[in-house]
Amino acid sequence: MNTPEGILCARSHEWALEEDNNVLIGITDWQVNQLGDIVFVELPETGSALEKDEVFATIESVRNAYELYMPVGGKIIEVNEKLINSPELINEDCYANWLIKIEPDNFQEDSEGLLEYSDYIDEVN
């Protein structure tokens, strides 16, 4: 699993990647390893506007249920529909299998508290 260049991580284990004026959001590989086999994901509705730190999804694994928080605020323009029927894809590659795509409100400002991936890994280990 390759970590995309430019990825930013929240201390609550979500990642954000700016791509063509939009932002992909998912869950980090470190958190996926903590959760174990993912069996269910509940994603928000397209068109929802959510603020930074607001709950946007729930993931359930064989070990635990876990709420996910918006690393940056914005309007949801796409959800990764294939995860609804195949949530285990997150275990296979949590970066290729992002959860939502948003149109950010203010990515520069919201991303100030996020960590570069290497700093995130240093912090969680």
Image (spheres, helix red, strand yellow):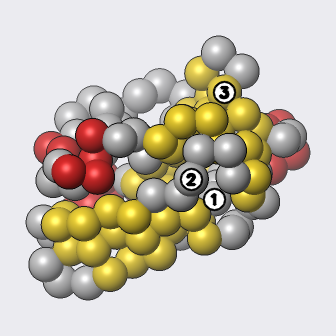
Label pair 1/2, CB-CB below 8 angstroms: no
The kind of residue tagged 1 is Met
Q: Between disc 3 and disc 1, whose residue precedes?
A: 3
Q: Is residue 56 shown left or right of residue 42? A: right
Looking at the rendered structure, the secondary structure element under dot 2 is loop
Q: Amino acid at mark 3?
A: Asn
Is residue 1 something one can see in this rendering?
Answer: yes
Quadrant of the rendering where the N terminus is positioned: top left
Q: Which residue is mark 1?
A: 70
Quickly name the residue at label 3.
22
Check the picture and name the quadrant holding the C terminus. bottom left
| Residue 124, visible in the rendered structure | no
Name the residue carrying label 2.
45
What residue is shown at x 66% (from left), y 27% (from top)?
Answer: 22
Residue under the image location 75 percent in, 52 percent down: 49
Q: x%, y% of residue 46?
A: 59, 45
10 Å neighbourhood of mark 2: few (<14), some, or many (≥20)?
A: few
49 relative to 20, above or below: below
**Mark 1 → mark 2, Cα distance in angstroms:** 14 Å
Residue type at mark 2: give it: Glu
Mark 3 vs 2, N-terminal side: 3
Mark toward the viewer: 3 or 2: 2
Tell me: 19 left or right of 26.
right
Under circle 3, the secondary element is: strand
